[in-house]
Image (cartoon, rainbow, N blue to C red):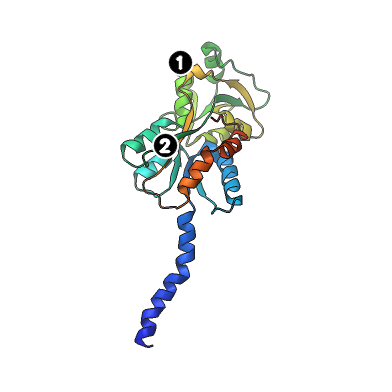
């Protein structure tokens, strides 16, 4: 092999992989709350149909995703199911200033297997009597937003003391929903949008908005992100077209 060929071969190899690397750099990696699975998948489909690289989306509890980001995990966008975890990342300097916005809002509901009694989610005594008599599926109330909202609502309605010992803690809100769907718990506390996406369950009660902090989903770009289209996809989600897609899955939008 000549000296010229030894020089050219590494360059040719570099050019051969460049298109793939460029494509990966264009497609944003999105870390999003588990409750947004269907809505963000629909939005990614719509974005891709307009000629963009398909976003890669990973769904999990907001708490788990925020900890992953804080530990150095690389991603381009974060969608949290509450403000607390976004605040934590902001304090660490891990979100891009000026890119944080409220994406959507949600409601908190009680779900149950068909045929079980409905619950008066505004009356603490009645709520405590029914939910405190059997396992209650909830996302972990110590860290996961859906669980934190649920515990706050039960505490304000003075039902938490009767319910706490029966709570089955799940790693995220969809896991809590699955416990009710499979019959492992007769009742569960989830978001209204999760109930819409479920099969074989009923909404047994709706918590009044005053019983818990507003359920908001902030979105922001992350400082570790490298994808060229991250900002474009963020703007699309906040646009009229993007908001309409999310609204069709039951989220409250601007």
- The residue lying toward the viewer, choosing from 201 and 78, is 78
Circles 2 and 1: CB atoms closer than 8 Å: no
Q: Image quarter for residue 252?
A: top right
Report the mark closest to the observer, 2 or 1: 2
Q: Residue sitting at 45 percent across and 34 percent down? A: 101
- Sooner in the amino-acid sequence: mark 2 or mark 1: 2
Disc 2 to disc 1, how far (Cα)?
A: 30 Å
Residue 119 numbered mark, or none: none
127 relative to 243, above or below: above
Q: How many numbered circles are shown?
A: 2
Query: Residue 37 location, x and y as percent?
Result: 55, 41
- Classify mark 1: helix, strand or loop: helix
176 relative to 51, above or below: above
Query: Residue 1 location, x and y as percent?
Result: 38, 88
- The residue lying toward the viewer, choosing from 195 and 8, is 8
As drawn, the residue found furthest toward the right would be: 115
Q: Residue sitting at 47 percent across and 21 percent down? A: 212
Q: Residue sitting at 49 percent across and 27 percent down? A: 215
Residue 66 appears in the rendering: yes
Residue for badge 1: 156
Residue for badge 2: 100
- 10 Å neighbourhood of mark 1: few (<14), some, or many (≥20)? few
- Classify mark 2: helix, strand or loop: loop
As drawn, the residue found furthest toward the bottom would be: 2
Judged left or right of residue 156, residue 47 is right
Q: Image quarter for residue 112?
A: top right
Query: Residue 189 location, x and y as percent?
Result: 54, 26
- 10 Å neighbourhood of mark 2: few (<14), some, or many (≥20)? some
Residue 160 appears in the rendering: no
């Amino acid at each position: 092999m000549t000296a010229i060929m030894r020089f050219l071969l590494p360059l040719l190899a570099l050019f051969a992989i460049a298109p793939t690397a460029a494509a990966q750099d264009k497609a944003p990696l999105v870390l999003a709350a588990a409750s947004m699975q269907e809505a963000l998948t629909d939005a990614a489909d719509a974005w891709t149909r307009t000629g963009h690289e398909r976003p890669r989306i990973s769904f999990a509890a907001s708490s788990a995703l925020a900890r992953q980001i804080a530990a150095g995990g690389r991603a381009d966008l974060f969608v949290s199911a509450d403000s607390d975890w976004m605040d934590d990342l902001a304090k660490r300097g891990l979100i891009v200033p000026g890119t944080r916005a409220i994406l959507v809002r949600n409601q908190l509901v009680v779900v149950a297997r068909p045929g079980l009694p409905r619950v008066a989610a505004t009356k603490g005594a009645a709520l405590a009597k029914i939910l405190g008599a059997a396992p209650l599926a909830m996302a972990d109330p110590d860290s996961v937003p859906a669980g934190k909202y649920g515990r706050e609502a039960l505490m304000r309605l003075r039902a938490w003391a009767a319910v706490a010992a029966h709570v089955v803690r799940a790693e995220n809100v969809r896991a809590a929903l699955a416990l009710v769907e499979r019959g492992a718990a007769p009742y569960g506390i989830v978001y209204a949008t999760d109930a819409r996406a479920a099969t074989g369950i009923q909404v047994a009660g709706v918590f009044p908005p005053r019983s818990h902090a507003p359920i908001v989903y902030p979105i922001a770009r992350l400082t570790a992100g490298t994808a060229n289209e991250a900002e474009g996809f963020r703007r699309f989600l906040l646009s009229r077209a993007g908001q309409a897609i999310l609204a069709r899955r039951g989220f409250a939008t601007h």
